[in-house]
Every structure is written in structure tokens, then in C-alpha cells.
Amino acid sequence: MLDQDACYRALRTRDARFDGRFFTAVRSTGIYCRPICPARTPRRENCIFVPCAAAAQEQGYRPCLRCRPEASPGTPAWLGTSATVSRALRLIADGVLDNGGVEELSERLGVGDRHLRRLFMQHLGASPVAVAQTRRILFAKKLIDETALPMTEIAFGSGFASIRRFNDAIKKTYGKNPSELRRAGAETAAADNPDLNLILPYRAPYEWRSMLSYLGGRATPGVEAVSGDRYLRTITLTGARGEVSGIVEVGSVKGSDHLLARIRLSDTAVLIQVAERLRRIFDLGADPGAIRSQLRGDKTLERAVADAPGLRVPGSWSGFELAVRAVLGQQVSVKGATTLAGRVARSYGRALEISDPAGEEAGLTHEFPSPRVLADSDLTEVGVIRARAQAIRSLARAVADGRIDLDVSRGLDETVEELQALPGIGEWTAQYIAMRALREPDAFPAGDLGLQRALQNGPRRPSAKQVRERAESWRPWRAYAAMHLWKMEGKRNATRS
């Protein structure tokens, strides 16, 4: 529930900390804007403040062409007061409603579709379908402004099922057809450029070096790599027209509040999914101000949070890929797990077919193997010990058969319980998977040795139970606290060596 007066004060000061937290619908113009819009501040009586863009569009307001709501850093899914709505928003962002209906979404969440619609109206002021439609429209506008893609590719790349629906939605929303919007917008990329360049906004600050260091140390050889100040990886997705392969390259842009992604795909129809997965890898929806205010009250974390106020939780391209990596990392060094992951990828992954000079230079050669492939593979042939090989096969079979969904449809406790029911997966592994693959901000592997060392005060390390009790005051941001503690412990080890 938004405090309308507080929102107006934020609007008057154009406070960037509120960008994406709410939108301003202006009665006198019929337009809705971001809090940072450079236009003259409207009178208070003409303003209605809504929690998401879909709520404004549901009430008949059009997106502002100056502040571009599609360029907002986004609303963190956990800002809602309903856990069900938060999980539903993340599933919608993953494209669940692009090919399915609210009934399917409700079933995955374990609630009735009428109840889900009621929750959405209560917390967001918009229906699930309206949220999904607004997501497609705003992403299409982003592609119109930032790329030279033909309108047909933009239509399918933003999740529309047909060109007619795309044209109708853009015309209804902006009062102009897509071609008119492009002519009126900024200069687009060169039409002969085989790559797509997308801007991925975030809330500052952002610890880009820390993100690269973490991902680079765990990069699967042949599948992903860190080269200089860039992260590269091979990708694979199942689109409406079949399997899609590609390479993405992501880097920071100095002096800006966004990352820049260079994308090369065999089929652009999955672009909206690619963009969302990249946001997930780099945790671009996080609100560092809210996280910082919660964690800096702890004496152990106070200095760490001050030194790295924009630290994020690295996500993953694929929940299954991350889960396999987590199992490989049980009781071995990070370097050892990375070596094993590279062997698995080279032996069982599909060779990369798409050509890309930067990818070749970084050593990208394979896609990570699918659950069905690993479910029938003997990983002991590449040096994985028998117990972990069996654990990975069981995990792969459960994912391939649909008995385990590595998405956000379940709550944290339920997800951890389901994962722990699989052979070879304990609480540490389950919490780590929830933390990085499922983007659970409160996941916390209390039994981790590094966390225990970071919290050690005296000759004896604290137990997992003691660490868990200590972490109660960090909720709901325990995953971010874990990242700060691991960073602290890494610095201590570097000093000791």
C-alpha cells in the first residue's frame, strides 16, 4: 500500500532511489511516468501513485515517452506483502503467461486462480494477465528504441503470439504504430549489425568487480568465461519455434546505472526470456538501499556493507546447471569443482554451432548438457566420484520427469525440503541452490564452513545452529549477508597468504 503523500515528495525531488518502486499516473495528461521524469512536476491533485506499470495501464494511462517506463530498473518481486504475489511476479517474468494462462500459473503456485487474481488486485492493482501484457509491451518499446530489429522480430522477441496483436497493443498503448514510434525515437543500431545490444538497468550502487570475481572463479570451462571486465557464456533455450542457441557478452558501462549486453542468437524469438535471465544472473532487480539499511545494524556486517554497498547475489542462467555445479562442489575446492564441471560440459554438452569471434577467443565451445542427457550418463567416466555421479543422475531424472521444478513456484522452505528428499543433496546444497538458482533473498547455507569462519570470534567456530540463530536479524536478506561474509573471509585468506 503506497503512501501517496510520501510518493509525491519523492516525485518532487526526483529521488532515484524510488525509481521502479512506484509510477505516477497524471490525470491531466493521461500519461504515467517514473519518479525521475524530467517533465515539470504535476500538481498533487492530478497525481495517482500506483505500484507497477500494469496498474497504470489498467486504468487507461499511457507510458511517458520522455522518461520511458520500459527503462526503469524494475520493481523487486519481494517488495509485495504477499509471498504468493512475489513468486507469481517472478514466474511471469520467466514467461509463464507468454504461452499459458492464469490457471496454469495458479496451479504452479498451489492456489486457486480466483484467489490469485484477488491477491494481484489487492497488492498491485492489476491482474496477472495485465502484468504480463505490460511486460511484453514495455519490452517491445525497448527493442524499438535500442535495436534495429525488424518489427516482425520485435513482435515475437517480446513475447507476442502474432504481428496483429503486437501492432494493436502498441497502437492502443502509445497512440502510434511501431514504425511511427521508431521514427520518433532515438537513433537505433546499424541495421547490418548481427549482434543485439541491450541496456540492462539497475539501482546503484553495483559492485561489478565483485560480481565478475565470483562468477569468474566458478566459470565452467567451455560454457562461460570472464575476459577482462566482461562476462561471456553460451546459452540455450527452448522457444516456440524449437531450440535456440546463442552467446551473450555482458559488461559494465562506466558512469552509468546499467550493464550492456551483446547478444547473438540463432532465433530472436526468445529475446524477452534472454533479457530476464540476464537480469537474474546479475541480480539487477535488487534494492541495495533496503538491503543495506537492514544489514548495517549488525556490528559484524557494518564495515563489510559500508565497503561494498552494492554487493549482489550472483544468479544463474539455468537452475539445473547451477544445481549440478553445487553437487560437484560438495567437499571439494572451488577450483576442483570448476575442473569437473568443464569435463562434464565437454563430454556431454552439445558443441556450440553459432559463430562468434569474442566467444571463440574466450574459449566458449559447448552448451551445458540437458537434464535428460545427464540422467542417462555415467559421470564417473569424467572423474566424478560414484556418490556424486548418482546424486546428479537422480537430480537430472527428477528435473527431466517434472518431479522437481527449479523455478520459484514454491516457497523457500518447501523448495529446500523437496531438494533434500533427493539422494546426495543436504541442507547446504539445497540452500545454495535456492540462493543462486531460485533467487531466494533469504536463503542461507548456515552449515557453510566459510560463513562459520567469518563469524568465528575465539578459538572455536560457531555451529550451523549458532550461525542460523545469529542470522535471524538479517532476514529477509540472509543471502546478501552470506555474500558479505564470504567476501570478508576471502579478504582474510588473502591477507594470511
Image (cartoon, grey):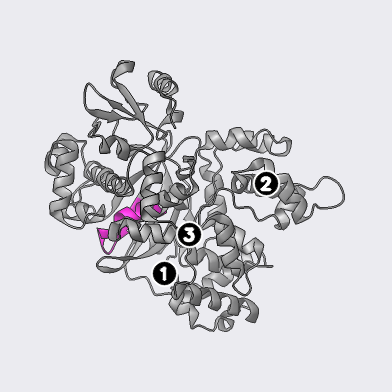
Q: Which residue occupies 39% across, 74% down?
A: 351
CA separation in Å, label 1 and label 2: 32 Å
Is 26 contained in the magenta span? no
The residue beneath circle 1 is: 367
| In the image: residue 267, left or right of residue 332 | left
The percent coordinates of residue 295 (x first, y second) are 64, 37
**How crowded is the residue under tag 1: few (<14 C-alpha within 10 Å), some, or many (20+)?**
many
Q: Secondary structure at mark 2?
A: helix
Residue 339's place in the image compared with 294, above or below, is below
The residue beneath circle 3 is: 225
> What range of the chain is rendered magenta?
262-277
Q: Can residue 26 be seen at all in this image of the molecule?
A: yes
**Dot 3 amino acid type:** Ala
Residue 67, by quadrant, is top left
CA separation in Å, label 2 and label 3: 25 Å
Task: Give the mark, 2 or 3, whose residue is nearer the N terminus.
Answer: 3
Q: Residue furthest right?
A: 459
Q: Which residue occupies 38% across, 22% down?
A: 11
| In the image: residue 413, left or right of residue 38 | right
Report the mark closest to the observer, 3 or 1.
1
The residue beneath circle 2 is: 485
* Prevailing secondary structure class for the magenta stretch in the rendered image: helix
Report the mark closest to the observer, 1 or 2.
2
Residue 80's place in the image compared with 444, above or below, is above
Q: Secondary structure at mark 3?
A: strand
Q: Secondary structure at mark 1?
A: loop
**Dot 1 amino acid type:** Glu
